Amino acid sequence: MRGKRGVADAPGGAWWREVTIVACALLLSVVLLIVFHSAGDAAWVHRYLSPVAGSDAAIWQVQTTFLSVGFAGLTIAAQLFAEAPLAIGTSRKRVLAYIGASWFVTAGLAGNAVMALESIWLQSATGVVIAFAWLAATAVLLMVSTSRLAHLFGHPSRLDEVVRSSLIETLSDRLDRVARRYSDARTGLEELLTSDSSRTSTRSISTLYVPVPQAGRVIRAIDPDAVRQAIASLDSSETERDRSDPALSGGDDPPQIVLDVRPGDRTRLGATAFRIVTSNRLDDAAAVRAVELLQSSIELEPPEAATAYEETEHEIATLTDAIGTSLRSGALATAERALELLGHIAQGVWMAGLDRADAAEGTSLTRGSGLLQSIVEVEQDVLLSPQVAEVFVTATTTRTLEAAATGSGGYIDECLRSFTRQWQDILSRGGPEFDALPVRIVACVQNLTLYSDPSASETHALRSRGTWAMVELVKLALDARRPEIAKLAADALRRLFELEPDGPARSEVRAGLLVLSGWLAYLADADDERYSPDPDLAAALVSDGSWDDILAAREVVDGGTPFSRWDRWETDSTSTGRVQSSALPGFIDRARDAALAGSSGDGQPR
């Protein structure tokens, strides 16, 4: 990702290179026009390249026509920028850079200026040759830009790739800037400030909260010199207090300052910037002095500045709004394309965060999670129609399949949670027209779970998490009072990895069945209305295998499971507000005992 992110600066750097090259060519052309207008043309120019009268004006007119055609083409292309995903500013910049629009504009305008000078004030035969060279350059650049633009909009997949790469690189570059800024700011403060986790003294009895100096401003940096002055002021105050009252001296912890903001954040009204922790309460004069010094250490951006996160959220909001509009208008193909793009952006930024070793306090992953939250917001439209739900299921399947190649368990979890959200919404609030969707979701999760990408760094990450995602589907179906759907998902879970009875994946399937069987027994014991007395469902949730297999599955449950939050089911289902000990593990043990009683095969005690 490092190499790719380096390209993020290419459009800006290329722009300055283009301006420099064209400016040098313009200056050279003007100098040559002056020289040949004053000193006369070379003999070979009159012999071989002698222009006819008025040719310079004709060239100027043709070049102006080319410019007009080019500008009209760019204007027409700009009409397409109102549609997703080109409505995003970063996408527009990358498309314009890809077609070479800046080259055409700068070279065309410079050439037009040269022709104007030659035609009006600096006429010469050599000047006509120079003007023709600028005309040829303008024509070539116009042809290149037009052909690239036609190719781009004639091949949507290529357009998506250009937009996707530009957004990922731009967002990752912003994260890099935030992380570097925070790291640079902390460099001079590490020895001055105290982290919350390292402050272990139990004698710190006074905390002074230092508010931010202004609300609604972006923090540029923290000045370590001002912080150092504040610490010196606190130390001198402690020394004077000890001299005035020797009985209070000795054994006290030195004053400690904790930083609660970081560069790149926008300050909020009433937010705390620093905390001063002391063993004794500060006198008013010392407190005021310390607060003033610490507040002065915060350097702020201009009022109109926006944070990197706000810029990102604005661009992503444009994309998510376009998705919602397309879904409601029935443009499902456009919505699916934009939804796929949003998923690629989230994955790219998430993986960039994993690659960034110097990311400050999870900044990158926080940004990746924020992009995934945009997907969550878009998925609230899943019940618009069965066709829209199909679009979301397809997009989630594609995103999860691509996540398997990353080997990132956290990102795979986030993708699978899209299935559980859609499943819950469809079962809880969907009408009969959505009856085909649960079967589709079960099939997708089952196929993804059985899929194994040998190129992934963690080849079993999706298999394990997919198994427990299926467990969650069964539980959510019971929550929705849909026992027939729970039976459908339980049967699919039971069939997973049947051809690998001794493998670790099958052991996780047995563990999931134990948890679900225990949960069903828990609901029955609690006389919960979600309990289903269907004997076929209960039979489908009985763990199979030998005694050794079942005992190993119980150990898997105790050892912690990925994705599934089964240990919170009992808490989430308690609506009375009473605090009580967890009973679900006991029911899981009963499910284990019932499975052992019905078990057969090797591994039984003799």
Image: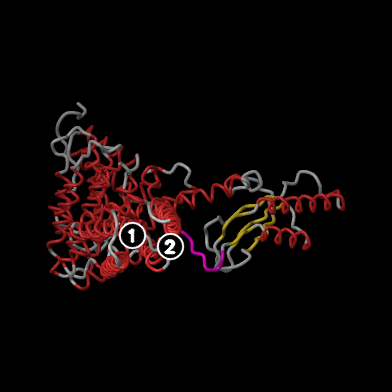
Residue 128's disc is 1
Rendered image quadrant of residue 210: bottom right
Labels 2, 1: front one: 1
Q: How many marks?
A: 2
Magenta segment: does it hold 307? yes
Q: Secondary structure at mark 1?
A: helix
Q: Residue at x 21, y 68 (%)?
A: 383
Give, as a three-letter code, the residue at label 2.
Glu
State the residue in front, 217 or 130.
130
Q: Residue at x 19, y 32 (%)?
A: 502
Give, as a three-letter code, the residue at label 1.
Val
Residue 50 at x, y = what percent? 29, 57
State the residue in front, 502 or 328.
328
Determine if residue 83 is in view.
no
Which residue matches tag 2? 311
In the picture, the quarter occupied by the N terminus is: top left
Residue 547 at x, y = what percent? 21, 33
- Magenta stretch, main secondary structure class: loop
Drawn side of residue 67 relative to residue 605, left or right: right
State the residue in front, 294 or 348.
348
Q: Residue at x 75, y 50 (%)?
A: 232
Residue 411 to residue 477: above or below: above
Q: Secondary structure at mark 2?
A: helix
Whole-number angstrom distance, CA of label 2 to CA of label 1 = 49 Å
Drawn side of residue 157 relative to residue 242, left or right: left
Magenta segment: does it hold 605? no
Residue 465 to residue 90: above or below: above
